[in-house]
Amino acid sequence: MAISPKTTLTNCQHLLCEEFALSFSKHCWTHLEFKADYTKQVEGFLKTADERSVCLNLRKAQLQDLNFSRLNLSGSCFNQAHLKHCEAIGCELSKSDMIGARLESCHFVGCALNGVNFTKAILRDCSFSYSDIRHASLTESTLHDVDFMGAHLYGVSLWGAEFNNVKHLKRKSFQDPQKPSKETQAAISESNHLMACDSYRMLKHYLNNSGLYEDASWAAYRELTMERKYFFEKKDSRYLPSLLMDLLSGYAAKPNRVIVSSLVIILFLL
């Protein structure tokens, strides 16, 4: 019979420890005595788990060669965990906590990762192909050799993220798959205009360096739009000139506006 994970978090039984106990254990990772045996416990559960929703606490655990495929692990905690050579194909991980996690050579293919918090995570040689990462947070994360082929990143937070050899990331990656495919639908998180401005600037440089110049133009336009909205919030005098530049030329990213504004001026002067 499979071991049932703890659905209610309990405190680590080590004296004066305020951490929660890991799933399948009475102790947190720091005070776990036989760490190698714990890996086997988790592996045993994963091999016999069914399709029921399971919420795991693997905070700070160091695990490798595990297969999380096709399990519903929504809301699980991988905070500061170190996972190596793990598979998660078709896995449900939405709204999970991966703050400060370190993931190496892990494959999240066709996964539901919407709303996952990857803040300050380090992702190395990982694949997120065809995964739903909408509204996730990659704030201050570091990505080395990460593949986003076919992934959906609409509404994702990218402030302070560091990209190194990130693959298959383009404007289309940031479109909402549930809405018509239009340029205006492509967006990252814009709840904080100044942070969104910085994030679009980073995307602009990445897309330019990737030779995706039209996509870089989209990012440049969104960057200046976020800057204008920030000026408006702060009642900055630069707001009106920025608005005028948008109306007349779309910050030089929308040539149709240049033509229309030029015709209007000509007709006005006649």
Image (spheres, rainbow, N blue to C red):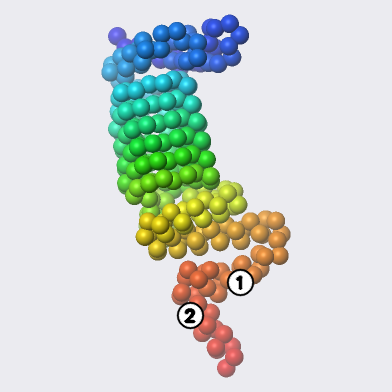
The one nearer the camera, 67 or 233, is: 67
Q: Is residue 67 above or below residue 128?
A: above
Amino acid residing under circle 1? Leu
How many dots with numbers? 2
Q: Earlier in the sequence, mark 2 or mark 1?
A: 1
SS category of the residue bearing label 1? helix
Task: Determine which quarter of the picture holds residue 72.
Answer: top left
Quick one: which residue is furthest to the bottom in this view? Answer: 270
Mark sitting on residue 180: none
Residue 241 visible from this viewpoint: yes
Amino acid residing under circle 2? Ile
Q: Position of residue 67 (x, y in %)?
A: 30, 25
Quadrant containing the C terminus is: bottom right
Q: Position of residue 101 (x, y in %)?
A: 46, 30
Task: Determine which quarter of the picture holds residue 235.
Answer: bottom right
The residue wearing badge 1 is 244
Residue at coordinates 40% horizontally, 63% vertically from top-left?
213
The residue wearing badge 2 is 259
Q: What is the spatial separation of the Cα atoms under label 2 and label 1, in whole angstroms?
A: 15 Å
